[in-house]
């Protein structure tokens, strides 16, 4: 990645100084570039202030360790953060509902890998069927194995810039077909960050959840990709004091990976059938 270095201290923060600080905090600089940037920091107060802000934001989102975040996701995220930072209040609200780092400190419930692999075997049988039925079966399995209140699959519709709840199981199953905005939702934030995220009382930030028939206390959201293209998210929500842990994340991630691969295979097969029919 090309890095711009500064030869004299800045008078004020600019978009450029903000971006450099963000990239530095994300660990995107080479060791040499880091060293030169740190030398600059020692004489530049505006850049030091930027670094302080960014490191707080990034630590909060537990992004520092996620070296596997695709760079496109990072850029999108940085753009979004800059927009949200400009809106100030919005950003503060968003960072207050993301509690992903808590996943690392919570006690982990007993693993049940046998049940997970049995569920995957059942799901694999559906590979020859249709996509909707597969997604329906995946959310039912996620609901059960994560002991959740609701489980859902939100499909990203790029053109409309929305996520649609194409598959739902559990307490909010009646909301199937509902949508949330691409730019302002737990699913959107999760895709921006490119890593699973845990949300606490998301209605404090995403006000539209306040109208849900059951209050959402926690939401664990995992991005789903077909190849490199985001398909949407797989998620579980709790409507009581159920708190999700690393084992839930593992289960959900397993199903999310399966979904990405399965949908890729199914769509590939349809595309082939379509072209064979021509
Ligand atoms: Zn500077």
Image: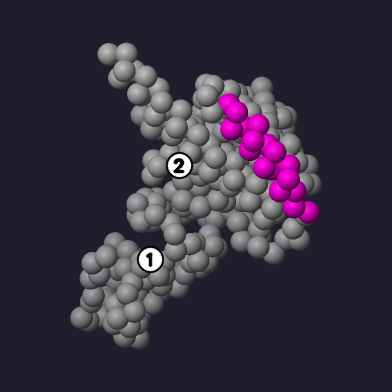
Q: Position of residue 14 (x, y in %)?
A: 28, 65
Residue shown at 35%/24% (left/top)? 272
Query: Does residue 91 show up magenta in the picture?
Result: no
How many numbered marks are there?
Answer: 2
Residue shown at 46%/51% (left/top)? 194
Give the magenta-colored segment's residue range.
110-126
Confirm or deny contact between disc 1 and disc 2 (CB under 8 A): no
**Is disc 1 placed on a helix, strand or loop?**
helix
- Please, is residue 5 above or below residue 239 in the view? below
Question: What residue sits right under mark 2 in the picture?
Answer: 225
> Residue placed farthest to the top in the image?
277
First-in-chain label (1 vs 2): 1
- Please, is residue 37 above or below residue 182 in the view? below
**Residue 21 shows in the view:** no
For the C terminus, give its image quadrant. Answer: top left
User: 248 or 49, which is in the foreground?
Assistant: 248
Question: What residue sits right under mark 1 in the picture?
Answer: 22
Left or right, 61 with reference to 118:
left
């Amino acid at each position: 990645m090309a890095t711009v270095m500064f030869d004299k201290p800045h008078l004020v923060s600019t978009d450029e100084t903000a971006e450099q600080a963000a990239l530095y905090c994300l660990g995107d600089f080479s060791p040499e570039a880091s060293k030169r940037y740190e030398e600059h920091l020692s004489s530049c107060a505006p850049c030091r202030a930027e670094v302080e802000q960014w490191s707080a934001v990034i630590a909060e989102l537990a992004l520092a360790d996620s070296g596997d975040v695709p760079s496109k996701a990072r850029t999108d995220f940085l753009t979004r953060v800059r927009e949200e930072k400009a809106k100030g209040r919005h950003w503060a609200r968003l960072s207050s509902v993301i509690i992903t780092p808590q996943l690392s400190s919570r006690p982990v419930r007993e693993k049940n890998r046998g049940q997970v692999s049995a569920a995957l075997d059942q799901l694999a049988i559906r590979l020859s069927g249709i996509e909707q039925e597969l997604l329906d079966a995946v959310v039912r399995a996620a609901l059960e194995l994560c002991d959740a209140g609701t489980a859902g699959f939100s499909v990203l519709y790029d053109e409309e810039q929305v996520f649609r709840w194409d598959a739902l199981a559990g307490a909010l199953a009646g909301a199937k077909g509902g949508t949330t905005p691409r730019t302002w939702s737990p699913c959107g934030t999760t895709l921006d960050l490119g890593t699973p995220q845990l949300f606490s009382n998301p209605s404090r930030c995403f006000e539209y959840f306040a109208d849900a028939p059951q209050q959402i206390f926690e939401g664990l959201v995992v991005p789903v990709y077909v190849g490199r293209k985001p398909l949407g998210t797989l998620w579980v929500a709790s409507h009581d004091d159920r708190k999700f842990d690393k084992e839930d994340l593992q289960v959900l991630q397993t199903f999310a990976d399966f979904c990405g691969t399965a949908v890729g295979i199914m769509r590939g097969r349809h595309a082939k059938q379509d072209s064979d029919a021509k």
